[in-house]
Image (tube, helix red, strand yellow):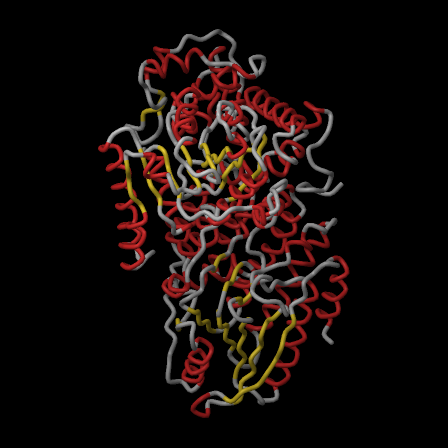
Amino acid sequence: MSTTTELLRGAAELFPDEVVTQVHVRHLDLPEEAGRFALITLDNGFDHTKPTTFGPQSLANLNAAIDQVEAEAAAGEIVGVGLTGKPFIFAVGADLKGVELLRRHEEALAIGKGGHDVFTRLASLAVPTFAYYNGAAMGGGVEVGLHCTYRTVSRSIPAFALPEVFLGLVPGWGGCGLLPNLIGADRAVTVIVENALNQNRMLKGSQVYELGIADAIFEAADFLEQSLVWTASVLRGELEIARPEIDRGEAWDQAVARGRGIADSKVHGAAPAAYRALDIIAQAKNGDLRAAFAAEDKALADLIMGGELRSGIYAFNLVQKRAKRPAGAPDKSLARPVGKVGIVGAGLMASQLALLFARRLEVPVVLTDIDQERVDKGVGWVHEQIDMLLLKGRVNQDKANRLKALVTGSLDKAAAFADADFVIEAVFEEMGIKQQVFAELEAVVPEHAILATNTSSLSVTEMASKLKHPERVVGFHFFNPVAVLPLLEVVRAERTDDASLATAFAVAKKLKKTAVLVKDAPAFVVNRILTRFMGEVLGTIDEGTPVEVADRALAPLGLPMSPIQLLELVGPAVAHHVAGTLHQAFPERFAVSENLGRVVQAGKKAFYLHDSGKPELDPEISELFETGDTVLSEEQVRDRALNAIAEEIGLMLEEGVVAEAQDIDLCLITGAGWPFHLGGITPYLDRAGVSERVLGRRFLAPGVASVPE
């Protein structure tokens, strides 16, 4: 047994819950008498629901397999070594469950070195090595293949990525050094930084090949067989694999500079991972892989022991685990079937909902509105979007025709909704209008039908209060754009029954949304938090702080938008309306900015002009403002906003708006796009000491999403 194997098996004691990957070596004769070949298969013994990962014991198993093939190669018994995975999965990287358990920098450093020690052996064997990316490959799964001499990829791979920067790490087992030296710095920056910071964008098999990461691409049906035929041709010298010449001059530096610009625009310097990755890519320009790997080891260890990674893993677990088992949801056996959906309204939000319901549920969807022109416009928009899906190859012609046939419009609610099982309203955000809509619906829908509201801030209980059967009313609050943001706040009103709620959650699951159970409280979760922090920022502007100063104040958090950019996206009128709703409920904490009211009254949609290429405050906005003479610094504005957020979350948890702080974070990540490196917000507030300063306690237990104490 090699020293590396012994060390890794010793380190396995730190990862007691590791799902161990077994590594099998089998031998076969390549086609056309190309020679005896060793094929290594990675397999954790589970089906594709548990992807193959690399913890210390798994790395030790791979190292032991390499011991075997190394001896066979040195003895001339084999002509090459291949590496592949179980069906549908190649390997998806390091075992993140174990990473959370590391307590010392030297332990984290050993993980980086251990991966490098094993993977680099593939490049130093006496025979060529081949990686056959047969299924999902991420992180260390991608990197182990990069250490091989050649790579093939299955065209059907749905997910191929180096997602480390997204989580708060760097590709630390060779990715930062090897990838730019294989495909060039610019393409590597796209894969390592740009894709990761764009909500962890995945590559498909064809993109992996087009980027030059793989040398050949084959269909899934006979992928391994074709890869072995191709391997035989390479080993017999019949195929010469041409690799592009890498530009190590100014183009390399420009690529790194582009990456820094992307990182600045996404995280504003608030999270170190992207910058550390770019530093290593810059260092790898001279082709010195040994130095690049050493830099990866150090960066990996530093980041593993940092708060951002802990928050990133915490956020990842929320999205991957908690989101799939919504806290407080009733037993799914209570859910009723939904065979037809009705939508009241045919505006943009209603049309987005119609498209989503038709695509995911594949049941008839009927839109209604106050006149035929609006109905036709809404249905027409849905049909146009289906045509766009057809043009992009997302659906075939038959599917497009069927989806279009499912979406229709009507002015007659009684006829349209008489057999509907689920009806959702998306009309103007005014209580009287919504109550009138529900009264009309109750008179025409079947007794079992669910009545849902897409309200963003109004009381669902009050909305249902005049109905004979308020128990079937639920809040079903989507976030705009509906196709992009996963969150769905499912609101239980005071009299909503379990069957209605279970049906709502069942529908949400079919819609592939992240459903979070929310108590019927003003503005629910996301809008309440955003309105509170927006109100504090606007308050400092009203008091005299320059708009530009207040708008920069939250930049260190690395939020997807500054407060004013968010205000422009939401729309000043909508933000002003929600602020008014919350002011009525909590006048002591939620103010209504008179300056924002003037902006709305003037019909202004934006605070900034972009004519010069960079945002500048619209002078007409400045003329509208009436401010005091209290000028705060960016730090003072930030402290005030964070204190307010911590206070509001504390109150929401006391009120039982959601089950736990984790649900607050899940909502902000999936509904407002708050970054993984914050873990939503509560880990950041804990880490920065804001929670204890404001509430006298943390939101999360010590060590959860933070550096262990």
User: Where's residue 32, x and y in %?
Assistant: 43, 91
Look at the image and tell me in which quarter the C terminus lies.
Answer: top right
From what the image shows, is residue 368 above or below residue 601? below
Horizontally, is 628 left or right of 396 in the view? Answer: right
Q: Tell me which corner region of the image, top left, top right, bottom left or bottom right, holds residue 702.
A: top right
The residue that appears at 48% across and 43% down in the rendered structure is: 486
From what the image shows, is residue 145 above or below residue 263? below
Horizontally, is 343 left or right of 60 in the view? Answer: left
User: Where's residue 234, x and y in %?
Assistant: 42, 81
User: Where's residue 342, x and y in %?
Assistant: 38, 39
User: Which of the pair 507/139 is nearer the observer?
Assistant: 507
User: Where's residue 462, x and y in %?
Assistant: 51, 22
- Furthest-left residue in view? 373
Look at the image and tell me in which quarter the N terminus lies.
Answer: bottom right
User: Which of the pair 92/233 is nearer the observer?
Assistant: 92
The residue that appears at 53% across and 25% down in the rendered structure is: 461
The residue that appears at 50% across and 15% down in the rendered structure is: 539
User: Which of the pair 3/309 is nearer the observer?
Assistant: 309
From what the image shows, is residue 198 above or below residue 173? above
The residue that appears at 58% across and 57% down in the rendered structure is: 172
